Amino acid sequence: MEPAVFLAALLIFVGIPAFTVLRIARLRAARGQPSEDTTARLEELESRVQELEQQQAEVQERLDFAERMLSKAREERRIGG
């Protein structure tokens, strides 16, 4: 392999990914830690999401129960009628 081709391939397959990794590392380092206010808001939102998930699960259980009751009533009418 010619040296120019080897260097071009080395640059493409090693240099560009290495440059990208270094750039991402610099961006993460510059980002810093979130403020206490941001952390508190995030915890509040996570708590609210858990509450909403619980409510949604309860509503789903009620819907399932109602569907079973309707299905049972239809079946009884079909058999009895």
Image: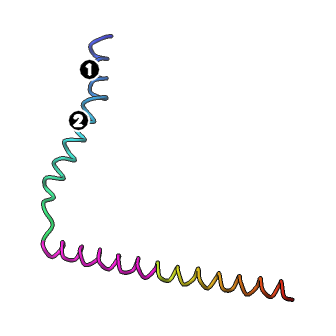
Name the residue tied to disc 1.
Answer: 7
The N terminus lies in quadrant: top left
The three-letter amino acid code for the residue at tag 1 is Leu
Q: Is residue 7 left or right of residue 76?
A: left
Is residue 39 rendered magenta in the image? yes
Q: Are marks 1 and 2 in contact (CB under 8 Å)?
A: no
For this orientation, the residue located farthest to the top is 1
The residue tagged with tag 1: helix, strand or loop?
helix
Residue 24: percent from left, percent from top: 22, 47
Name the residue tied to disc 2.
Answer: 18
Helix, strand or loop: magenta stretch: helix
Whole-angstrom CA distance, mark 1 to mark 2, is: 15 Å
Q: The magenta stretch spans which residues?
A: 36-56
Q: Could you classify mark 1 by the number of other residues whose Cα lies within 10 Å: few (under 14), some (14-19), or many (20 or more)?
A: few
Taking the spot 87% from the left edge, 89% from the top edge, the residue there is: 81
Q: Could you classify mark 2 by the number of other residues whose Cα lies within 10 Å: few (under 14), some (14-19), or many (20 or more)?
A: few
Observer-nearest residue: 3 or 38? 38
The residue tagged with tag 2: helix, strand or loop?
helix
Q: Quadrant of residue 51?
A: bottom left
Observer-nearest residue: 67 or 32? 67
Q: Is residue 75 left or right of residue 34?
A: right
* Whether residue 36 is situated above or below residue 30 in the rendered picture: below
For this orientation, the residue located farthest to the right is 81
Q: Is residue 42 left or right of residue 53?
A: left
Residue 6: percent from left, percent from top: 29, 17
Kindly identify which numbered label has been placed on residue 34: none
